[in-house]
Structure formats: structure tokens, C-alpha cells
Amino acid sequence: MKNNLISFHKVMSYELDSWGHVNNAIYLNYLEKARNDFMTQKGLNFKKFSEWEVFPVLSRSIIEYKKPAFADDELIINGHISNYTAASFTLQYSITKKDTNIIIAEAETFHVFVNKKNRPTRIPEEFMEKFIKPKLSDSFGE
């Protein structure tokens, strides 16, 4: 996976399950935090969605768990845009342990922009130009 976007996270004790490793459901929170970090890196924030009156909603997520993460592990979440249409985009992620560079999970999330009536709508041009198009061209430029 080409590392176009990056986010960092330190595992907290409250994210652990009874077996002492990160609960599988917590990884969705990690992906959400990473998406927020990715948007910030491109000069975007959630206020923009209110201005545009359209919002990206998560329509599907896939997570493949490879190795466990534990309290105090420092994680690196790399991501890139792998596909898009006029109303949707796909993000791919790789989550690694900072100290060992071991991949602990790989994921993919699918997002659809919707309007206030919850109907699919076109991705705003500013979002497309700042977030999607540059990352897609970088991903395929290898």
C-alpha cells in the first residue's frame, strides 16, 4: 500500500478486551480517527460538510486482523484513496506497530456522499480536488 496519508495512535487500556489486546470493534474508531487526520492534512474539516450541506457516510468496512495490539503500543495508520465515483470513494489502510513495523491490520472503507434527505449526491468539488484526486493519482503513479 502506498503511504499517502498518515495517522498515529497510542493504544489506551480502555480499548482492550478481556484477553488484554485491542478489541476488534475499536479498530473502526482507529479508522475514523485516521480519516479525520487525513482530512486535516488536506486542509479540510467537518465544518465544510455543513457548508456544503452534504456528508460522507460509511457504507461498508472490511478489516482483516493480522496480529494483536496491546496497551501502550504506538500504531501508524497509513492510507490512500483506491477508487472513487461521482458520489463515493474508497480508502485503504494499513495499521502497523511503530516499533516493529509489523502489520496488525489492513482495512478498506467505502463512503457515499449524501444530502440532507439522505440521498446519494455528488462529491463537492473542493473535497474532490483536495482529498480524492491528488491521492488517487499518487496511488497509481508508482
Image: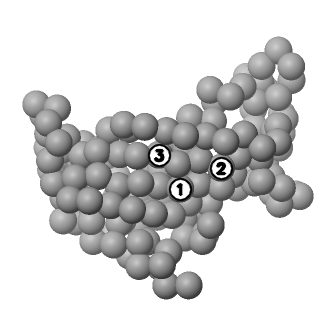
Question: Would you say residue 73 is visible in this rendering?
Answer: yes
> Disc 3 marks which residue?
109
Circles 2 and 1, Cβ within 8 Å, touching? The answer is yes
Q: Residue at x 83, y 55 (%)?
A: 102
**Left or right side of 50 for 14:** right
Residue extending furthest toward the top? 18
Q: How far, Cα to Cα, is label 2 from label 1?
A: 8 Å
Query: Measuring 17% from the left and 42% from the top, which residue is drawn there?
Result: 120
Q: CA distance from mark 3 to mark 1?
A: 7 Å
Quadrant occupied by the N terminus:
bottom right
Residue 42 % position (x, y): 40, 66
* Disc 3 residue type (three-letter): Thr
For residue 92, the mark is 1
Q: Please name the amino acid that badge 2 sits on.
A: Glu
Of the numbered discs 3 and 1, the one sitting upstream in the chain is 1
The quarter holding residue 64 reads: top right
| Labels 2 & 3 near each other (Cβ < 8 A) | no
Given the current orientation, which residue lies at the most extreme left position? 117
Q: Quadrant of residue 60?
A: top left
Quadrant where the C terminus sits is bottom right
**Which residue is labeled 2 in the image?**
106
